[in-house]
Amino acid sequence: MDGDAFSRAQEHLAHGRTQEAEAALTQLLPANPGVAELHASLGMIAGSTGRHALAAQRLERACELDPQQAVYWHNCGEALRLTSRLQDAERAFRRAIAIDPEFIAPYDSLIVVVQIAHGRALAASDAA
């Protein structure tokens, strides 16, 4: 991967130039389809701009490519939660916890997903 181009993209991100960062990363992707960090970065950009389905897709790919990155699984779970894929989100959070039990964020996210699912189950039973 072109490290200079990736560094420039990260610099764009650091300065809030999301469109420029996304364009730079997207240009790197065809020559580097197996680089998890590219997919993860593009997923985070998509999520930060409200494109949660695309974020989930990109982050799922990052997790496939580098399945030992707890932060990828956590971020993927957040994107999945925001697309109402609660069971998939729960699995992603549990995977993040299994990889790095000291990483606190997935625990909080898992609680939220379980509460949402429980609330939906209660609403469904009340409606029946």
Image (cartoon, grey):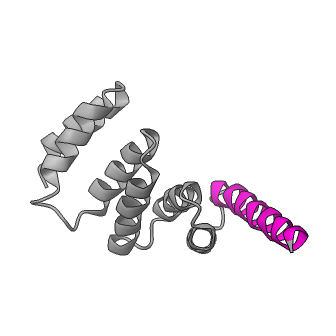
Residue 126 lies in magenta, yes or no? yes
Q: Is residue 20 left or right of residue 62?
A: left
Q: Is 16 drawn above or below residue 85 in the view shown?
A: above
Relative to 38, is 127 above or below?
below
**Residue 33 percent across, percent down from the top left:** 18, 65
Residue closer to the observer: 105 or 52: 52
Question: Which one is nearer the viewer's eye here, 63 or 101?
Answer: 63
Q: Could you say where residue 102 lies in the image, as x and y percent from the top left?
A: 66, 61
- Magenta region: 105-127
Q: Could you tell me which quadrant the N terminus lies in? A: bottom left
Q: Is residue 102 above or below residue 51?
A: below
Residue 126 image point, x, y percent: 90, 68
Quick check: 96 left or right of 126?
left
Q: Tell me how many marks there are.
A: 0
Residue drawn at 44 percent across, 46 percent down: 47
Q: Quadrant of residue 17?
A: top left
**Residue 2, position in %: x, y?**
11, 49
Q: Quadrant of the C terminus?
A: bottom right
The image quarter in which residue 113 lies: bottom right
Q: Residue at x 27, y 54 (%)?
A: 38
Q: Residue furthest top?
A: 15
Predominant SS along the magenta part: helix
Examine the rendering and report whether any part of residue 116 can be seen.
yes
Position of 21 compared to 48: left or right?
A: left
